[in-house]
Image (cartoon, rainbow, N blue to C red):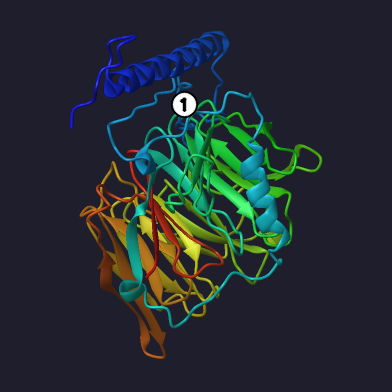
Amino acid sequence: MASIADPEDGLTDYERLRQENIRRNEAMLASVRRKADELSAATRSAKPKRGRGRPPGQSGKKPGMKPDPPASSIVLRSSGLSPAYLLPEPHRSGTHLSSSLASSILGAVSSSPAEAKTRADDFDAGKELVLKPAHVRRVVTSRVLSMRVLPLVDRTVVAAGDKFGNIGFWDVDGVSEDQDGDGAGVLYRYLPHKSRVAAIVAHQAAPQKIYSCSYQGEICLMDFEKENFNMVHLCESPVYSICQTQNRVRCLYFGDGNGDLTLFDERVGKVSTTWDVHDERINSIDFHPENTHMLATSSRDRTACIWDVRNMKTKEPDSLKVFKLDGPVQSAYFSPSGCMLAITSLHGTVRVFSMDDFDKSHEHNQTGSLLHKFKVIWGWNDTDLYVGNMSKAIDIISVDVNDSGLSARNNTCLWSEYMTSVPCQLSAHPYIVGHLACANCCGKVFLWTSA
């Protein structure tokens, strides 16, 4: 039945609603343009920072990459999709964090014991994981470069950083006032960085304090107890990786574009030690889950290394083990028990090593891509590895180690009609078995859950 026009203004209900939507969108875009002008002015006034790279020829170390320029605008787009696919409006309150998100996280923190991450040796991801339509959300405006499922025992909150410096939070269990309990959760978005967000970390003993780093060399702290965020350190070179050890909550280890590994003590606000560990940028840092003095690093210089931080010299330190690959190394991560190490190269090669006997290893090849820089991750046991592929799916690599050696094979893959692009970033929930998040180049996050 057609809408009846109101005799007072001659408009139907549909036309009146359409005009209200147009006025609301125009007001939102005007706010966005004002923010873009402010960012543009800040960009023009800021002086570019120079890296510490050594000139080629003087040593094996190459100069750090120049940081990307800050984003000049924030883009909000609605393409006629359901509310579950729309972007959140960016928060305009400076460095203030949402009280509702803070309450959700702090409420989950109070019930989260400082215990080891959950293990599930008999979990079969290929049979049990599904992707529901409500678990697809566009969390940030552009390509997701970093992502982390926060270590909360009874709640799922995903943090994702994009190439414009945004960090979006998806409170999967949250319900907003204008929602009807559709299970899509609530989105929040902030702009703590001027450039690409390279990594996000949160310690299991203090998940309310979230650290992130960027290509501009910024290290930021989002503190949900204080409900604000700020920069705690500025490095002269781009920072590509960041990590925390199990027994030191407020100490950060970060890797820069020059191949230096740095220990930053956030309690006193200064750098404690810097080690010259690689010739080029450090792509990942990971501490052993049992041995808190042992860490693994991966680098663009085609190597991954294992170190003991107690015995490292600042210049040309000796590593416990060096792994050489056929291309730049994207990641090196310990398994949940620490018995194995999985390494990913830019060319798509995944190599798995036994920590008890490095001769026990297996190389698994998949199709790589310079655009999609995959990083293989462990799930909730020592038998399953997860990595995105070019077919818009997630490969599950089954690992088996015994007296005769180590083997790895493609067991199955996770595919869904709702995952419409290549999943580049992956993160498994530390406590809830079966919650696996992945993200793509369009700012969307997909959350796989147990059926």
Q: Is residue 182 left or right of residue 277?
A: left
The residue drawn where x is 45% and y is 29% is 164
| Label 1 SS | loop
Mark 1: few, some, or many residues within 10 Å (few <14, many ≥20)?
some
Q: In this view, does 112 lie to the left or right of 405?
A: right
How many marks the image carries: the answer is 1
- Please name the residue that numbered disc 1 is placed on: 66
Q: Is residue 317 left or right of residue 173?
A: right
Looking at the image, which is closer to me, 323 or 399?
A: 399
Looking at the image, which is closer to me, 355 or 414?
A: 414
Residue 238 at x, y percent in the picture: 53, 33
**Is residue 59 at all visible to an observer of this figure?**
no
Q: Please state, as top left, top right, bottom left or bottom right, where the N terminus lies in the image.
A: top left
* Image quarter of residue 84: top left
The residue drawn where x is 54% and y is 50% is 174
Q: Please state, as top left, top right, bottom left or bottom right, where the C terminus lies in the image.
A: bottom left
- Of all residues, the one furthest to the bottom in this rendering is 403
Looking at the image, which is closer to me, 91 or 48?
A: 91
Vertical placement of residue 315 versus 296, above or below: above
The residue drawn where x is 43% and y is 33% is 163
Vertical placement of residue 42 versus 374, above or below: above
**Is residue 5 at all visible to an observer of this figure?**
yes
- Of all residues, the one furthest to the right in this rendering is 268
Residue 22 at x, y percent in the picture: 35, 17
Q: Mark 1 is on which residue type?
A: Lys
Residue 283 at x, y percent in the picture: 47, 47
- Of all residues, the one furthest to the left in this rendering is 1
Residue 114 at x, y percent in the picture: 71, 66
